[in-house]
Image (spheres, rainbow, N blue to C red):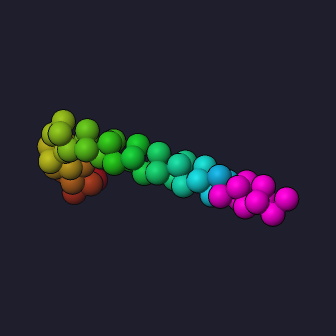
Amino acid sequence: MINDFNTIAYFGDGKIDNMRNQALNRVKSILTNAYNKGFDYWAEGLIHQVAHR
């Protein structure tokens, strides 16, 4: 009984960690793609827009 509970608790935490890691990896890949596709150019455009409002 106790062993079953520990197993459920362990795998429950594992699922949460998996979800968090997947989300972080998704954000990292989005930022990496943005950087690789001319992040500096995009940032300059954004600064230009804000500066001329």
Residue 18 versus residue 34: which sits nearer the camera? 18
* Quadrant that contains the N terminus: bottom right
45, 52: nearer the viewer: 45
- How many dots with numbers? 0
The spot of residue 6 in percent (x, y) is 73, 61
Q: In the current view of this chain or complex, which residue is farthest to the top?
A: 37
Residue drawn 76% across and 60% down?
3
Is residue 29 a member of the stretch shown in magenta? Answer: no
Measuring from the top left, give residue 16's x and y in whole percent. 60, 53
Residue 17 located left or right of residue 10: left
Identity of the residue drawn at 33% across and 41% down:
30
Q: What kind of secondary structure does the magenta stretch mostly adopt?
A: helix
The residue drawn where x is 20% and y is 44% is 35
Q: Position of residue 10 (x, y in %)?
A: 65, 58
* x and y, in percent, of residue 15 in the image: 61, 49
Residue 2 falls inside the magenta stretch: yes
Q: Is residue 21 visible?
A: yes
Say which quarter of the image contains residue 5: bottom right
- Residue 45 in sight in this render: no
* Apparent side of residue 28 relative to residue 41 in the rendered image (left or right): right
Lateral position of residue 34 relative to residue 18, left or right: left
Task: Judge left or right: residue 10 versus residue 33.
Answer: right
Instruction: Identify the residue at image location x=59%, y=53%.
Output: 14
Residue furthest right in the image: 1
Span of residues in magenta = 1-10
- Quarter of the view holding residue 33: top left
Q: Nearer the viewer, residue 9 or 35?
A: 9
